Image (tube, rainbow, N blue to C red):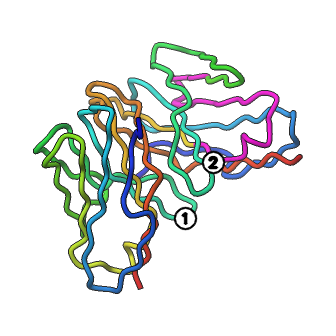
């Protein structure tokens, strides 16, 4: 099993450009999450999903959109990138009703 | 805002010594977890302790939980170079299992 995978691993965007980050998991988990991690800080929740076709806002949702069209995939979109969105983005998944999360390797995004 | 705050922010010890990290949180919880993050990698779940437990062991890890003080500690015994990483506590804030909130982490360095 690959676990949780993220695509791409690195990306550089110019201000105003858009992009989509893809997260995939092969553990048949119901829940999926997108976090961002800034230097010296813990993870902050952007959006999450408790099942296919459902999404919800986390702590820092502004400037991001998400979609969960398939159970195994969770997409994070930036419609108009800003330098403040320079960060490392992590996807995670968990079984329904449990707190333990499994993380992907991260995507390092730089917005210039 | 972050639920958990780790202390110290950084810790450097000699290989073979024990490392202790502390976490304080603000609201009631159902459980508390500890995760490890190696440089440039995703987080890996280490251990979960429930609110009705006071101590839990897993290999060289020992976790304690004091719900009256809203605090937890992670002890790593007989440290190794491979233990060099950042360690994060995470709590569910007493709400549903779908979300957890991470602290800002402790950076542990093991000197050979």
Q: Position of residue B82 (x, y in %)?
A: 74, 41
| Badge 1 element | loop
Q: Chain of mark 2?
A: B
Q: Which mark is residue A39?
A: 1
Q: Position of residue A72 (x, y in %)?
A: 24, 42
Hey, which quadrant is residue A75 in on the image? bottom left
Q: Nearer the viewer, residue B94 or A95?
A: A95
Q: Which residue is mark 2?
A: B86
How packed is label 1: few (under 14 Cα within 10 Å), some, or many (20 or more)? Answer: few
Magenta stretch bounds: B64-87
Q: Position of residue B63 (x, y in %)?
A: 62, 24
Asked if residue B37 is among those painted magenta in the image, a careful observer would answer: no
Give the answer, above or below, for where A25 lies relative to B69.
below
Q: Which mark is residue B109?
A: none
Position of residue A88 in the picture relative to residue A93 (left or right): right
- Residue at image coords 51%, 44%: B43
- Residue at image coords 25%, 47%: A48
Residue located farthest toward the left when viewing the structure as drawn: A53
Hey, which quadrant is residue B54 in on the image? top right
Residue located farthest toward the front when viewing the structure as drawn: A1
């Amino acid at each position: 099993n690959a676990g949780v995978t993220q695509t791409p691993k690195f990306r550089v965007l110019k201000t105003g450009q858009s992009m989509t980050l893809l997260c995939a998991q092969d553990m048949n988990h119901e829940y999926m999450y997108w976090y961002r991690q800034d230097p010296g800080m813990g993870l902050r929740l952007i959006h999450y999903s408790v099942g296919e076709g459902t999404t919800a806002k986390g702590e820092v949702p502004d400037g991001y959109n998400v979609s969960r069209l398939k159970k195994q995939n969770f997409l994070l979109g930036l419609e108009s990138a800003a330098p403040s969105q320079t960060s490392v983005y992590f996807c995670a998944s968990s079984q329904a009703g449990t707190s333990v999360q499994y993380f992907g390797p991260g995507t390092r995004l730089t917005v210039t | 805002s972050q639920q958990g705050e780790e202390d110290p922010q950084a810790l450097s010890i000699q290989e073979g010594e024990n490392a202790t990290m502390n976490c304080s949180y603000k609201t009631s919880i159902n459980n508390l977890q500890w995760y490890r993050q190696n440089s440039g990698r995703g987080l890996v779940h280490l251990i979960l302790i429930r609110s009705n437990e006071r101590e839990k062991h897993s290999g060289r890890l020992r976790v304690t939980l004091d719900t009256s003080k809203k605090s937890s500690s992670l002890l790593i015994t007989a440290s190794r170079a491979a233990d060099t990483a950042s360690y994060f506590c995470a709590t569910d804030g007493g709400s549903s299992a779908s979300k957890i909130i991470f602290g800002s982490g402790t950076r542990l360095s093991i000197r050979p």
